[in-house]
Amino acid sequence: MLKLNNKPLSYDRAFTHNDIQYPANWLRLASLEEKKAIGITEVADDPTYDQRFYWGPSNPKQLNDEPAVDSEGKELGYTQTGLKTLWSNTQNEIAASLLAPSDWIIIKAKETGSHIPTSWKTYRAAVRTACNTRQTEISNAADVPALKELLFGNATISQQKKDSEGKGITESVTYQIQKVDEEGEGVVDADGKAVMEDVTEDRPVMEDVPNPAIATAWPTPI
């Protein structure tokens, strides 16, 4: 992040300094020395965090419902809703949105006494089951990182393959690197070209497997 007078600058945006207007492409075209000359400094970007689960970097939100308290720790007489309850309620909303497109089928069947297709019965029951299961999984989350992974983790993870005895499988990989002398300097031949040598090492054999830490999937709409 670039800053000038302690204010952040954005690439491809014009800015003014000491009554001088700098064009939008100036930051990309200017050298480091030119930037420093007018007082621009480069600092690390602010750490990012998921605002759905954290108040700030390394500052997770409340996981469980707890009594609200003041600055002295005295209870205020009401309950502060935690992430588990909030996300559990969200599952109800998702389930309702999945069921809504087929509500008319159920209403029609009740009003006319007609048959409800089995496929719709099965699907709607699967939605309700998935909702209940996901809410149980949310309730069982150990901490905020686990809850976030449960709801938004990748469907698969990469891990080392194992044999029938549960031992990690490896494979030998050979590649070339430049030789080094006793002083750690790269060795070259008479023409100045790097002298290479073969190196063999065992590397784990990886595979993608379903992520066991994510929530039960919703049924596919029909």
Image (cartoon, grey):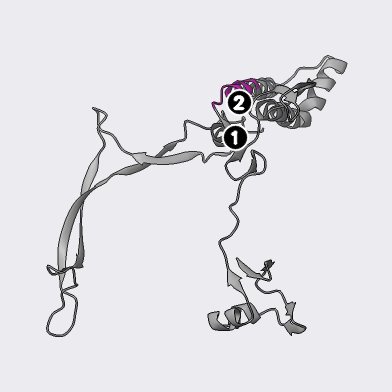
Dot 1, crowdedness within 10 Å: few (<14), some or many (≥20)? some
Q: What amino acid is labelled 1 in the image?
A: Leu
Res 150 quadrant in image: top right
Residue drawn at the location 54% of the way across and 82% of the way down: 33
Residue 25, x across and y down, in percent: 66, 80
Q: Nearer the viewer, residue 186 or 94?
A: 186
Residue topped by disc 1: 151
Residue 34, x across and y down, in percent: 58, 83
Q: Is residue 45 magenta?
A: no
User: Distance of mark 1 from mark 2, alpha carbons?
Assistant: 8 Å
Q: What amino acid is labelled 2 in the image?
A: Ile
In the rendered structure, the answer to whether residue 130 lies left or right of residue 193 reads: right
Res 190 quadrant in image: bottom left
Query: What are the residue bounds of the magenta stretch?
Result: 132-142
- For residue 172, above or below residue 217: below
- For residue 181, above or below residue 37: above
User: What kind of element bears circle 1?
Assistant: helix
The C terminus lies in quadrant: top right
The N terminus lies in quadrant: bottom right
Res 24 quadrant in image: bottom right
- For residue 9, above or below residue 65: below
In the rendered structure, the answer to whether residue 74 lies left or right of residue 199 reads: right
Q: Nearer the viewer, residue 8 or 115?
A: 8
Residue drawn at the location 21% of the way across and 66% of the way down: 177
In the rendered structure, the answer to whether residue 7 lies left or right of residue 107 reads: left
Residue topped by disc 2: 138
Residue drawn at the location 71% of the way across and 29% of the way down: 86
